Image: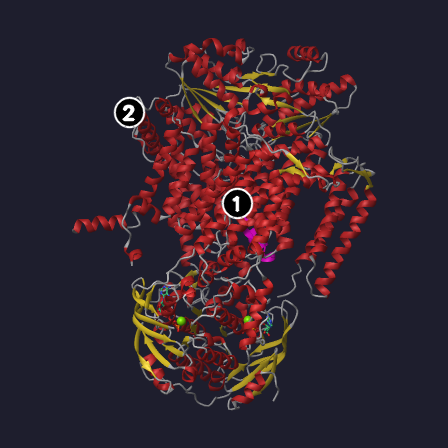
Amino acid sequence: MRLELKGITKKFGDFTANDQIDLVAESGEIHCLLGENGAGKSTLMNVLYGLYQADGGEIVLDGKPTVFAGPGEAMKAGIGMVHQHFMLIPVFTVAENVILGHEPTKALGFLDVDKARELVREISERFGFDIDPDAVVGDLPVGVQQRVEIIKALISDAQVLIFDEPTAVLTPQETDELMQIMRQLKDEGKAIVFITHKLREVKEVADKITVIRLGKVVGQAKPSDSSEQLASMMVGREVDLSVDKQPAQLGEASFQVKNLTAFSAQGSKVLDDVSFEVQRGEIFVIAGVQGNGQTELAESILGIQDKVSGSIKLEGKELLGRSVKNVLDSGVGFVPEDRTEDGLVADFTIAENLMLDRSDRPPFAKGIQLQLKKLHEFAEEKLKSYDIRAQSIFSKARQLSGGNQQKVVLARELSRDLKLLVASQPTRGLDVGSIEFVHEQIVAARDSGIPVVIIATELDEATQLGDRVAVMYKGKIVGIVSPETPREELGKLMAGISA
Amino acid sequence: MKQQNLVREIFSGNAVIPIFAVLASFLFGGILIAFANEEVQQASGYFFSRPGDTISAVLNSVFGAYDALFRGSIFNYQASSAEGMIKPLTETLAYATPITLAGLGLAVSFRSGLFNIGAQGQIIFGAMFAAYVGLSFELPFLIHMPMAVLAGLLGGALWGGLVGLLKATTGANEVVVTIMFNYVALLLLTYLLKTPVFQAPNQVNPISSPVAESSRLPGILGDGFRLHFGLIIMLAMVVAVWWLMHRSSIGYQFRALGYNPSAARTAGINIPLTYILVMAVSGGLAGMAGASQVLGADRQLTVGISATFGFDAITVALLGRNNPFGVLAAGILFGGLRSGAVLMQANQGVPVDIVLVVQSTIVLFIAAPPLVRSLFRLPKPKAVQA
Amino acid sequence: AAAPEEEESAEGTDSGTSEETETETETVDYKACMVSDEGGFDDASFNEEAFNGLQRAESELGIETAAVESNTGATLTEYSSAIDSLVGEGCDMVFGVGFALATAVRDAALANPDTDFALIDSGLSNDDFSPLSLENVKPIQYDTAEAAFLAGYLAAATTETGTLATYGGILFPTVTIFMDGFKQGVDYYNAENGTDVSVLGATDEDQANWSATGDFSDIAKGKNLSEQFIDQNADIILPVAGPVGQGTGQASLDSEGVLLIGVDSDWYNLEAHAEYKQNILTSIEKKMSDAVFNVIQSGLDGTFVGGDENQYVGNLANGGVRISPEHEVAYPDGIQTALEALTDQIISGELVVNSLYKN
Amino acid sequence: MKQSKKTPIALMLLLAVASLIIPNVQGQQLEVRVATGTDLFPIPNIILPSQGFVAVMLILMLAMTALSVYLTFVRNRKTPLIAVIAFGFGLVMTVLTWLFSGATMGITTLLAGSLALAVPLIFGSLSGALSERVGIINIAIEGQLLAGAFTSALVASVTDSVLIGIFAAMIAGSLVAAILAVFSIKYLVDQIITGVVINVLIIGLTSFLFSTLLADNISILNQPPRFERISIPLLSQIPIAGPVLFNQTLIVYLMYLAVAGVFLALFKTRWGLRLRSVGEYPKASDTVGINVFRTRYMSVMIGGALAGLGGSFFTLGQVGAFGKEMTNGAGYIALAALIFGRWNPIYAAMAALLFGFALNLQYALQIVGSPLPSEFLLMLPYVLTVVAVAGLVGKVRGPAAAGKPYVKS
Ligand SMILES: Nc1ncnc2c1ncn2[C@@H]1O[C@H](COP(=O)(O)OP(=O)(O)OP(=O)(O)O)[C@@H](O)[C@H]1O
Ligand SMILES: Nc1ncnc2c1ncn2[C@@H]1O[C@H](COP(=O)(O)OP(=O)(O)OP(=O)(O)O)[C@@H](O)[C@H]1O
Ligand SMILES: [Mg+2]
Ligand SMILES: [Mg+2]
């Protein structure tokens, strides 16, 4: 099968997200799509999948011009897609999510649940996933959810498969598995479009590479091109891919976590006697496969984890048992793992988001009266210094691309007087240019003499950014090692094999 | 060419939508009015012999009715005195006062993500508290009146705040609780009006004595008019709510909660406390609507004190897009319909229920600009065209 | 001076209508108007009864009329503006139906001394509730307890189970006066005959604790409450709840031997109650249509006299209240005569039925 | 998340209330009448010694409270539903004994009346379930019920057929639902405004038609036939349950079917899975080829038809005539029952039954002669609902996309 996009143009109001884009996906080929955050990659794929209607151009399928009125028609034509934002119903089980849209039924339209389970098991087996078909999707860690998405795309036996940033939330092992699967599919003769920000992956699997910037195709690249070349093609300038940091200037251990133990609502232990200390001027990375208690650790520090015991001390002051407000006021900067859910109010403007945790105090409020002028000055300054790409400080957060949203959160959290910075997966889903910037900001925070705790699933990020790396497994810290530790060793720790 | 553009500009703008919405719903209401009219019924009996009679009867009934609506709500050109001419507009504003106050309260809660449909009960509580202060004390006006108004605010705030408290502590759904609390408040009022707490001495009916002169909201335009100081309070509240929601840190936190509770929590906003505060502010404003009725309009407490203001307020709040100035506009629209309805009935014998029909169709049409556009074949505005 | 309607009011509604219908075309330059309370003019009870008087006046006296029906959720202000509008429309006489309109009628009467007013079910009072008398307002009230007493006596004599029942919509005094009179009639019967007939729904001494459905519109609730009464053995039920009483009628269809008593007008003759009219023992009539008609006529004749001292209190003596004549349900032997005797005793003052109009 | 302590605390509070009641139980015995006219064999009245019976119930309640406390505080587990139900049974029995001790309690009538009061609420909550599960908030249940009540009375009167009457009611209900659907799906009007306004519109229309049309022609237009009782052989002869559940009118049987049917359809069929997916995350449904708009229209209108059917219960099932605004807020109570029942048809039906029971119990209290003013008794069902929602249900989560229009780019 050969799928051709010719001169696709898509506008949102006055804004042109795709401008005359051409793209070809051919059987037995993996075509990588590269571009910085907001370049228009997802938009193009959504047009291809019938979710958006193009304002210009055409889709040609095996030589025939085709119009998809909706995803249903695209599916029928043999197109499957793994969406960047999960298209999963959180309250449904894995099996229900997988069969949605093409449900096996018994008489009278009753669902054949056994058959659905069977289907999930079959696919899981074929691609080496281990997924309980009866688990409720919302309870699953995002990595597992991503697998469910992939199963959904595979089950329909599509000839063209679109993967929109599936690896942003996968662990390195999971990523490797997925690439294996993609190769397998390619060998079966499917056409694959693969979007990712991780150049290592591109170089590994791509047959063809198309780079788009600001809604336009800027050119083709070869898998053999260097990462630096790809990066600068995407961003339009030179990018330094290594984290540029001085050796740490360590101070006293002002942040101490001791014997932290927590239980989930269901009563299982999610944190098991976790203890560590972080010194001023040090980046302490917590690595590990997602779902091993990192979220709970971060939430315990912030004060929203229930049923937790032990001690968390910042400069001698106990944080455990305090309200969130109190913790934040003690000088904790907190970058949540899920920025859209916890970090931002999507319907607020950039300016409003910048005072989310300080709206009731100077300089943003005098008594209860907001000081909007001060806020706007502040926002203008941050927009510039953090290079937040938006029309103005009055743009709604939801209109920003993922990378720029993350910058808003960082700008807010880093501009307080911090005594501790806790950031979960600060660069998830960001393009190389934005990652570079975010890393610089984190290192700068460290260099200002505060302890920094980073929760990372990316090994590269963990080793490049960290001064020390702790690995969590099943709620425990199984080892604290230097960032120079070889990858394999770290991988073993993450799999629960103690050093 | 240019002129055509101007016309197009005007007709594609959002400002004309309400006008055409009102027009559309009047057409619809007109059908019912004609249907109910006796002359029309008679004339249609011999429609085929003299169709003109039916047509003129229809036109008479419909124009008569809407003329009466206009004269009853905006300007009575038939009145003998200048006073009489402007009186309808003042009546409209008098009705708009409680509806807008309660609507403001609901707008605050809707904006904050809480679906308070308990304005009805909160108005009753406000009215009871205000009436209690108005009946039980002898104080100078400058103390008594503000105290009674504040009591109304307090009553509504307590009854609303209780819902917030229940939600904050037990997670109880506010929709269910406010529906139930409306009934409880009404029953409590009915009971108390038969006890010495409120019932007037020497009175067998469930009516309180008029509240003390010193606690009343004084008339604005003098004796001939029902417009009272509540209007000023209401207008002040429009501005106050705007300030609260858009210029104060409290309102900012309310809105953050409404848009994204989990981000609000992560940012250190105290969610349970905010629930209680939102519901208290929301209930307090509805309570002031109750106070305005007891101290300004009715001057005594009756079982019907809350009328249907609490339900009207839901529509008014949402129709005004939860924006205080929008709520004011919607409140005046509802006030006008209430005020005009009476004359429509007295003058033309139009059944009162038609007003409900006209009122609801106006709201539906106003809320659905594309429908009005397609009905009247108005051009689309630019943004939508793109 | 006695109010003019008192001479005629003993006549039934039916007698007047048939002969005078021809006069209808000749219009007279007089306009009588009416404002209802919440129930509206189709309530098959209170407001409808009053409205009938207005309609009868229109057809028989050839006058003009106008009426404003108040919606559920009307406010005092709306009552006032309804009356103001009617005055503005040139009404010569305006009726306010129901105690809720008292303040509105008073204020309008003070502002419009040239217009006549009548107020049903309430007197006028000043702000401090001291009684107020206005030349141009005629209060029309009903000592319904007297007729209810007779109905209670009749029911006590008729019951086979020895258990009666009554309930209100909301326990307003104009509602409980029915229940109270009814209960007194039953007690009187018990005392006279040594029986022990009880009245469910009004067992407590404190009237506040009597039974009520909570509103005047939810008919299903009336049916439900009635079914429970029937389950507790009641076989005659007096609903004082406007249209909600239709629920009792329906309940009577579902159980053998259950009767009901109507209120305000003779339900036996009303279409809304036709389905179960065979179960209507009697009705406690409050002949508002007569009073309305008569007051309009006095206005037309120029004999209208207002003022507190000229208020009209309908009672057995002036025929303003009564119980309906025997229809399908046969009264026990001798009861008809007993009822007549009781009526005479009440009229003569020998027997006093307590009510708020007598103390 | 900690194990919520609400349930044991609520039970302890209620236990305290019960122990206040118990010393006041007067009278020697509680006579329970089970018999109705239709029993197979005469059932004698059951006579229970009041004090003894109450003591047994107290022990039951104590045991359940202790269990709940143990599970919550020691074992850190949830209190099972069955324990709460057992406690509730004990409490209700205690209250009933207190009320009826020394008199006769017609348990059958009490329960039958509760069911009757609940029927329209249940239909209404089914409409709510179908609508909200697909993502359209349905405040318009009240309007749907009222339209059904009006139409069925009118049509059944004219045609003299209850079947045509309920058919018409279903059409009327789904037309009202169609207004809700069109305005919220096509014109993207706020669903809550649309619902509230539809209620006003239907009140206005029906009242208008009632006064201009029905009131003057009662015998032709507003005297519909009523449903006949159909007793199901054998089943109807079971004591208590028989007469309450199986000697009923057609519409009540339809209600049983509707509750079961909606439950199965929502949770066991392809249609229901798709419907719920649309109510949770319409975009995700769209991406698997489900027609979001059509699914929404269908479900909302089927719900409307059910509510219309429920409305006909007022006129054809209960009262035999239409009256202005006769639904009197039942739609709002149905909405509350829906939320109380966590958007699940069976739980919602149970919530509606609980409400019906409280309402009817309150009448029983009025009749037996209670020391409280009627207004306070009338509060009972409302207060009880709040207590139940706050104490036992707590936080509930509705369909995620409810209230949000779906817009395609
Ligand atoms: N529904 C929409 N309405 C308005 N603007 C939109 C919409 N969807 C996307 N955009 C804008 O279109 C541009 C392209 O967005 P798109 O999601 O295609 O980016 P992307 O290349 O996938 O970026 P990322 O790498 O962050 O996923 C962005 O500037 C975004 O803000
Ligand atoms: N259905 C399931 N089947 C297997 N394991 C599960 C399931 N649901 C949850 N878990 C496990 O329970 C633990 C807690 O899951 P949770 O989603 O809270 O992870 P987390 O620590 O919050 O990680 P994340 O960073 O992904 O949010 C994890 O070990 C996860 O793998
Ligand atoms: Mg993207
Ligand atoms: Mg998690």
Residue denoted by label 1: B122
Which dot marks residue D255? none
At which x and y percent is residue B353? Answer: 44, 33
Res. D160 image quadrant: top right
- Disc 1 residue crowd, few under 14, some 14–19, many 20+, Cα 10 Å: many
Residue A132 drawn in magenta: no
Q: Residue at x 52, y 70 (%)?
A: A148
Of B178 and A380, the residue lying toward us: B178
Span shown in magenta: B159-174
Res. C318 image quadrant: top right
Mark 1 Cβ and ligand 1 under 8 Å apart: no
Asked if C202 appears above or below C56 in the picture, the reply is below
The furthest residue to the left? B1
At which x and y percent is residue D168? Answer: 50, 37
Which dot marks residue B52? 2
Q: Amino acid at mark 1?
A: Gln
At which x and y percent is residue A422? Answer: 51, 76
Q: Is residue B76 left or right of residue C92?
A: left
- The earlier-in-sequence mark between 1 and 2 is 2
Q: Residue at x 31, y 50 (%)?
A: B14
Give the quadrant of ligand 3. bottom left
Tell me, yes or no, if residue D344 can be seen here.
Answer: no
